[in-house]
Each structure stands twice: as structure tokens, then as C-alpha cells.
Amino acid sequence: MGHLSLVVSVRAEFWGRASALWGAQLGQKACILVFSFFVGHRLGAEGVGVMASVLALSWIGGTLAGLGLPDRALFRGAAEDQSAENRRLHGFFLCAVVLVHAGLWWIAPGLAGTSDPELVLFARGLIVGAGMQCGSALGLGWLRGATAVAYEVLATASAGLVLVMGALLDLPLGWVWGLSGTCFLVGSILGNVRLDGIVPQLPQRTDIESAVRAGVPYLLLGLGSWAVGNIDIILGRLFHGPAELGSLQVGTMAVRGLGLLPWVAATLMLRNLHTVWSQGERPQPWGWLRNSLFIGLLVAGLAWVVMPFLAQGHAMPVSAIERSTWASMLFAPVLYSVILLVPLAAQWRLSGTLKALGMGLMVQFGVGWAAMNEVEVASCVLAAGVGQVVVLMWLMNTLLSVPKERIKVD
């Protein structure tokens, strides 16, 4: 009876935290959607395309700067590791983020693919906001892994509110995005200070080697995970113009935006899985696969329902986003399964997870290269989906395998 009540209590706490995060993040996604409506109406399809490409490229730059430390922080939070080394690595991470995003700000016209002064100013505001949010990633990641989500919920809700209020007040859209990103950084620092987490400290010279050694496997994990889910945006940026990229962004917006549902669930599961797997239990991936496929099907149906609304809100004809929407709907169940299983598989066997992502990326680049001369931008979504199927098969193999020696999460 006592064991049953403990299980019920643990599940209630899990769903309480997950619901709070889902609510805050869904609210923020809705605010980003409203903000993107303002971008579409004030800056046109080119503005939406600039927003998609600049944020994607800023994410890549921030991830490289962080050397995988934010992804590692999820697992260190699950293990409740508050060591002095991790605090110094937090400080090292913040310094690296500032340097890299200062460089991105300088080359904003190249990232935006335009020399239009209004769009360049918008791009620079996006880079500032992306840098602020990137700087929060390590601290919030540690808190998420430790299941202390209150400050992340508050930061996320505040960031969404700033986006909507700033746009309604007719403030420059780049500034608004920058202020929104600042909310995340404030929440990260304040949460770690108040809860005695990994408060950033000044790094030492020897911490560079430590950061590289500890972070590089997680850098590969973070880059690979992001690329597998967003390769269509990269292919669109390479082979199509800003207007077509804007149509791709809007067409895949519903499926991509709601990917937070399986991601939040997976990250909040890490702490409990760290405990039970250390006691000798094995993963149960078939149940996770079933649930994520079902959620993906529901989201695909929702994407079809909201397609006209998204087109109208961004001042685009439905025909401009229809094929991209259908392609994203087709692969939504697979994508959501990949999103859920990647962090769980990394907790079980990091090397197998990296192999799965590598196999999928090779397929995506191969299919994307073969389709680069296609006029239809939706071909980028199809190339991404084929690779995601490959990743899913390899992830299931990793979770079902019994390695001779499990790789211990650093």
C-alpha cells in the first residue's frame, strides 16, 4: 500500500510539473505566433524568412559556443551535481555565449541574406534575444534536470508576455525579441541563486580543457538532435529564397512548435530514470513509442485545422504553405517519437544515440542534395522526414540493446 501511494505521489508531481511547463511553453508559443503575425504584416514574407534563418543560425552558433554544456546540464541536474567545477563551467559558458553572439551581431546582414536596413536591424534584435536565451540554457537545463521548474515557468510566461505587449505597443520588433530573451536569462540566474544550484563563477584557465572534455559528446548530441528536427530550414535557406523559406516556416509551424510536448516530458523523466536504471532496471521503449506516435497523430490533425488561420495571420495564401503543411503532418508521429526518445536513449547509452543521429543526418543530407533542384520548398520537409524514420529505428535498437558496459553519463 505504501509503495502504491509513493508511485501515485511521484506521478502526480511529474504531471504537475509537466503541466506547468507545457502551459507556460504553449502560452509562449502562442505569443511567438502572434509576434510572427506582426512580423508578416510589418515586414512581409521576407521578414518571416529572415526570422527563421537568423534564429536557426544563431542557435547553431550558440550551441557551438556552449560546447554541449547546456545539454550536459540536464543530466547533471538529474544527478543533483552542484560541484564547484560545474559552477565554473557555467561561468565559462556565459563568457563564450557573449563572444559568439557579438560576432553574429556584426555579420547580421549575411545571416539575414539581405542588406535592407530595416531587416538587418530586425535581425540584430533577433540575435540579441537569441543570445540572452542561449545564456539561460545551462542554468535552466540544470534546474529542469533537477525537476525544479518554477523559475523556468515564470521566465517563459514573462517572455511570452513581453513579445505580445511589445508588438502591440508598436515597438521595434527586434528590440521586443531582445527583451523577451532577457527574461530567460534573469530566470536562470535567479533560480540557481535562490535554489543553490550551479550559480556561475569565474572560470579558471584549466576549465577550458574540462569544458571540452565534458561537453563535446553532448555538443554532438545537441547539434545532431537539432539538425535532425530542423534540417528542412537549413535546406530551405541553402536552396530557396527568403519568401519560400518564410512559407516553409509557416507551413511547418504547428508541428514544429508543439514539439515541446514530448521534449518536456522526456527531460522531466530523466531524474527518475537515472535512479531506476542505476538499480538495474531496463528501458521500456515500446510504451514510450506508442504514446509519442499517438501525440504526433493528434498534432498532425491540429496542423490541418489551423493551416488557413496560420496562412491568413501571416498574410500568405493557403496555397503557399499547403504542401509544406501536408509534408510536416505526414512525418509528425515519427518526429515526436524521435523528440521523446533522444534524451532517454542518451541517458541509457550515449554512443548508441549519437550513432542513431549520425545515420539519420547522412540520409537527410543525401536526400536533400538529390532534391536540391526541386522548385517546391516542401521537398525539404520530405528529406527531413525520411532521415527521422532512420533515426527512430536506430534509437529503438539502442534502447532495446543490453550493452556490455553502459556508458556512464558524465
Image (cartoon, rainbow, N blue to C red):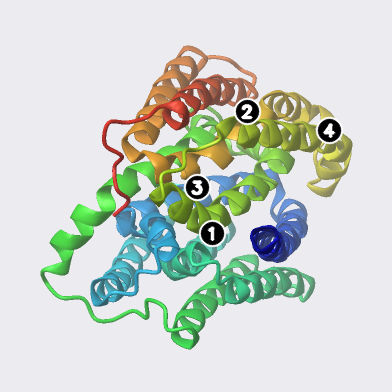
- The quadrant of the image that shows the C terminus is bottom left
Cα separation, mark 3 vs mark 1, equals 20 Å
Mark 2 or mark 4, which is nearer to you? 2
Q: Is residue 319 above or below residue 283?
A: above
Q: Which residue is identified by label 3?
A: 56
For numbered disc 2, what is the local secondary structure? Answer: helix
Direction left: furthest residue: 206
> Residue flagged by tag 3: what amino acid is it?
Ala
Q: CA distance from mark 1 to mark 2?
A: 40 Å
Query: In the picture provided, is 396 more to the left or to the right than 97?
Result: right
Query: Residue 374 appears at what percent x and percent y?
Result: 57, 15
Q: Which mark is residue 301?
A: 4
Which x, y percent locates residue 146? Answer: 49, 67
Residue located beneath label 2 in the image? 334
Mark 4 vs 1, N-terminal side: 1
Q: Position of residue 325 (x, y in %)?
A: 74, 30
